[in-house]
Image: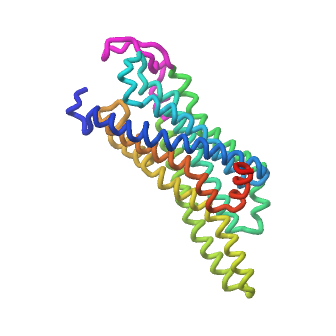
Amino acid sequence: MNNSEEYLSDSTKKIFFLINHVIIGMTICVFGIVGNCLNIAVFLKQGLRVSINLSLFAMSLSDLIGLIFQVWHKFCLNPYLELADLPIDFLSVQILTAGSPNIAMSRITCWITMYITAERCLSVLLPLRIRNIVTFKRTAVILLFCYSINLAFYFPVYSSSSLDWSFDPNVNRTLFTIVDNNRTMMVSLLMNVSHFYLSVIAFICNVIFTAILVVSLKKKSDWRRSATFVGDQNEALTRRDKKTVTMVITVAAILIVCYSPGVTSCFVEIFVPDFSIFAKQRNVYQVIWSFCFLFHSVNASINVIVYYRISSKYRTTFNKILFG
């Protein structure tokens, strides 16, 4: 393929890869791995029998696994690896060993966030019935479903593709790369459709539930101000509601902002055939997704700061674990 037909050259792509993947992305991933390990320790210390703790624990676990895969993903896309002249097609290898697992974990995080925002909506709309509706067992089943539904669609991909040595006529040498073993169009279609719908459904639901949560909380707070005679009790109730929900709204809002580029890229890929990892505009595609992965890293890493600043209970447990 002639580089003159592309909007971005290979050299420009390498510059973006070096900045987004190697320098900025790797730093964020290391911070996020440490932060999510601390999140997991805090929620285990507080106990997982509380529904919100179990949900946040499951989300921290998916973020941690996703960030570990991202470290390998960013290593594979380091442009300096070409100088080593290794017989490995790192761009193809990372698809099965890093890119796809990371996308799966990111989707799981999005689905768990969708459940958390829905649960908080019910707690504001139906405060007297929420304990009967949202139980520990139901939460555990829903979280397992979030993991299972997102991982299940990758089984056909890994059953039809593998890593092996294959001769590449473009470089006239044998490389360690992806080998399609009887991969059909149905498998590719299933992968693309499932990725699109699972991502978009969770993203749209997060937007809707977050908006409902903000509006419902505001109405609830206004009603309590007008219905309660004791001013101090009224303010305490309002602060409690805001503190409980503000963290969820913040986490959901960060996810919506960080996942918007990836969801937009999914739409563009459907309507623009040249916009794909191995198509004519592959350099543009890979550079844009370098930003998408960077935003995913931020979303998976920043929650430790959000929890610490907003939740006093989290902050107390965190300080006990870290500082004794």
Q: Is residue 324 magenta?
A: no
Coordinates of residue 188 in the picture (x, y in percent): 46, 30
Nearest the viewer among 274 and 235 is: 235
At 77% across and 68% down in the image, what residue appears? 128
Coordinates of residue 124 in the picture (x, y in percent): 68, 68
At 76% across and 59% down in the image, what residue appears? 133
Q: Is residue 54 visible?
A: no
Location of residue 251 by image quarter: bottom right
Q: Is residue 190 magenta?
A: yes
Q: How many marks?
A: 0
Coordinates of residue 281 in the picture (x, y in percent): 30, 36
- On screen, 111 above or below 315? above
Question: How is the rendered protein coloured?
Answer: rainbow
Q: Decide if residue 147 is on the left or right side of residue 13.
A: right
At 38% across and 36% down in the image, what residue appears? 18
Q: Decide if residue 57 is on the left or right side of residue 89.
A: right
Q: Decide if residue 194 is on the left or right side of residue 237.
A: left
At 36% across and 45% down in the image, what residue appears? 268
Q: Looking at this view, name the residue that lies furthest to the left.
A: 4
Region rendered in magenta: 163-191
Q: Is residue 108 visible?
A: yes
Q: Which corner quadrant holds the N terminus?
A: top left
Q: Looking at this view, name the residue that lies furthest to the front.
A: 323
Q: Decide if residue 173 is on the left or right side of residue 102.
A: left
Location of residue 231 by image quarter: bottom right
Coordinates of residue 121 in the picture (x, y in percent): 64, 63
- On screen, 112 above or below 309? above
